[in-house]
């Protein structure tokens, strides 16, 4: 379909701009009775329905009957490729078991690492395909995928190669991050320096062709601030763009370290300090907030959103999909929890799940908003206003997904249909 005109849009909602939008500066555009003209997979023009209908009379036209059109969601923090399940551990936590107790019995991240190491490439690909399909049905058209459940040379490489193969199997755009510095794995507990040396001398240089970003978890039980600075220096010199898991459970200054290294993003930030946010505001480092993880862990602390606004730090949202702390698929859920649990404004949550999320994975110039020249990644919602994303918080409002100008997914009644060339 080379030319497509979508008309009779009740609300066309988007942000716009060539940079991430800082907290406190959000300005959404809401166009009513609008239309979008798409040519060769890209947005060419938006405007009033009657104007574009007259201008492009020979286009294939779809009348959406007053429904809402928004950009496809961008999920900039996931751990999508893993094997195994941790539902028994989940029950133990609910019964009062501590994470340390679970670790001692072989659970926690160690359980997922063992299962992922044991799984074949085909099995990991099959599992990731199903997860990506679910995300697509919730409107996610671009996904960042981190490694981090192999934690040795061969299995980290296996995960990164599966992520690359996934690109050919799903309609979403895939962005890959090497997270070999997720934690020190169980088989290196008494050889910590050896694992860091493996990262520095072998994995980081060898995997540059497989991953665009490098990420590290700065936390008690993972990597110290001193270790992180040493590792980030090597990763930056190797040509990666940097991300940092920062200040999730304690304030170790991770957000400030991210800013010091010019990282694209610092992620989690439940315990981030005012000093770190001031640094992030000056460096332009985006704060990727993960409210579904905070919710699932039943943490009482939340990121200080008012300080993000004070220091003009752009906020993005993500699902943090993973088997242990956030088995969520929906960016709609992340937006709802960002509002109700973190105190974000609806406009902030919308931009955080679209344009700012795209900038946090260096895709803000091509996706994340409905602007001429960008990919035509659009969602048609079964509602007359974008506010229903939050007003009806437990409903999937996505009725159609358009990816690169093509209708790829349609929800028909209670039956789900998607393009047969994907997820197989």
Image (cartoon, grey):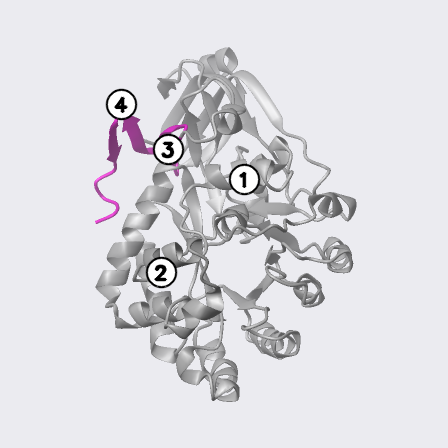
Q: Earlier in the sequence, mark 4 or mark 2?
A: 2
Residue sitting at 35 percent across and 68 percent down?
Answer: 111
Q: CA distance from mark 3 to mark 1?
A: 23 Å
Q: Is residue 18 above or below residue 227?
A: above
Label 1, on which residue? 337
Q: What is the residue that sits farthest to the front in this orientation?
A: 95
Location of residue 283 with respect to 14 vertically, above or below: below
**Residue highlighted by disc 2:** 163
Q: Tell which circle, 4 or 1, labels the residue nearer the N-terminal end.
A: 1
Residue 409: give x, y in percent of width and height.
31, 34
Whole-percent x and y of residue 172? 38, 46
Stretch in magenta: 396-424
Mark 3 vs mark 4: in front = 4
Label 4 and label 1: CA atoms lie apart by 27 Å
Q: Which comes before the other along the chain, label 2 or label 1?
A: 2
Label 4 sits on residue: 413
Q: Position of residue 61 (x, y in %)?
A: 36, 19
Q: Secondary structure at mark 1?
A: helix
Element type where label 4 sits in the image: loop
Q: Residue at x 22, y 63 (%)?
A: 122
Nearer the observer: mark 4 or 1; the answer is 1
Residue 165, horizontal then vertical, whole percent: 30, 60
Q: Nearer the viewer, mark 3 or mark 1?
A: 1
Disc 2/disc 3 C-alpha distance (Å): 22 Å
Residue wearing tag 3: 401
Label 4: how many Cα within 10 Å (few below 14, some 14–19, many 20+): few
Asked if labels 1 and 3 touch by Cβ distance under 8 angstroms, the answer is no
Whether 399 is among the magenta residues is yes
How packed is label 1: few (under 14 Cα within 10 Å), some, or many (20 or more)? many
């Amino acid at each position: 379909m080379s030319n497509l005109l979508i008309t009779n849009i009740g609300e066309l909602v988007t942000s716009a701009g060539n940079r991430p939008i800082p907290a406190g500066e959000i300005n959404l555009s809401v166009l009513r009775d609008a239309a979008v003209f798409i040519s060769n997979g890209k947005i060419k023009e938006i405007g009033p329905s009657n104007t574009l209908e007259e201008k492009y009379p020979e286009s294939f036209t779809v009348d959406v009957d007053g429904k809402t059109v928004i950009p496809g969601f961008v999920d900039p923090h996931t751990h999508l490729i893993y094997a195994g399940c941790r539902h028994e551990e989940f029950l133990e936590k609910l019964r009062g078991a501590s994470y340390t107790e679970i670790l001692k019995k072989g659970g926690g991240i160690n359980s997922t690492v063992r299962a992922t190491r044991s799984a074949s490439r085909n099995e990991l690909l099959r599992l990731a395909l199903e997860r990506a399909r679910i995300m697509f049905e919730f409107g996610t058209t671009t996904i960042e995928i981190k490694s981090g459940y192999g934690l040795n040379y061969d299995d980290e490489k296996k995960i990164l190669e599966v992520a690359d193969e996934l690109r050919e199997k799903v309609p979403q755009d895939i962005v890959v991050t090497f997270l070999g510095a997720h934690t020190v794995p169980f088989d290196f507990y008494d050889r910590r320096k050896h694992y860091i040396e493996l990262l520095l001398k072998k994995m980081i240089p060898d995997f540059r062709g497989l991953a665009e970003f490098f990420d590290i978890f700065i936390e008690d039980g993972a990597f110290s601030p001193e270790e992180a600075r040493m590792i980030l220096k090597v990763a930056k010199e190797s040509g990666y763009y940097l991300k940092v898991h920062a200040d999730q459970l304690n304030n170790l200054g991770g957000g400030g370290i991210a800013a010091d290294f010019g990282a694209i993003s610092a992620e989690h930030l439940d315990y981030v300090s005012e000093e770190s946010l001031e640094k992030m505001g000056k460096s332009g480092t985006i704060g990727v907030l993960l409210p579904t993880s905070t919710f699932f862990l039943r943490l009482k602390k939340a990121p200080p959103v008012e300080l993000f606004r004070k220091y003009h730090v752009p906020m993005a949202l993500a699902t943090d999909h993973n088997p242990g702390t956030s088995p969520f698929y929906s960016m709609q859920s992340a937006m709802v929890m960002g509002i109700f649990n973190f105190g974000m404004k609806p406009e902030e949550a919308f931009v955080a799940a679209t344009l700012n999320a795209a900038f946090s994975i260096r895709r803000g110039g091509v996706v994340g908003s409905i602007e001429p020249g960008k990919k035509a990644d659009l969602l048609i919602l079964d509602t007359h206003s974008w506010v229903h994303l939050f007003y009806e918080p437990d409903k999937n409002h996505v009725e159609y997904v358009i990816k690169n100008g093509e209708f790829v997914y349609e929800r028909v009644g209670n039956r789900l249909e998607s393009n047969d060339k994907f997820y197989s």
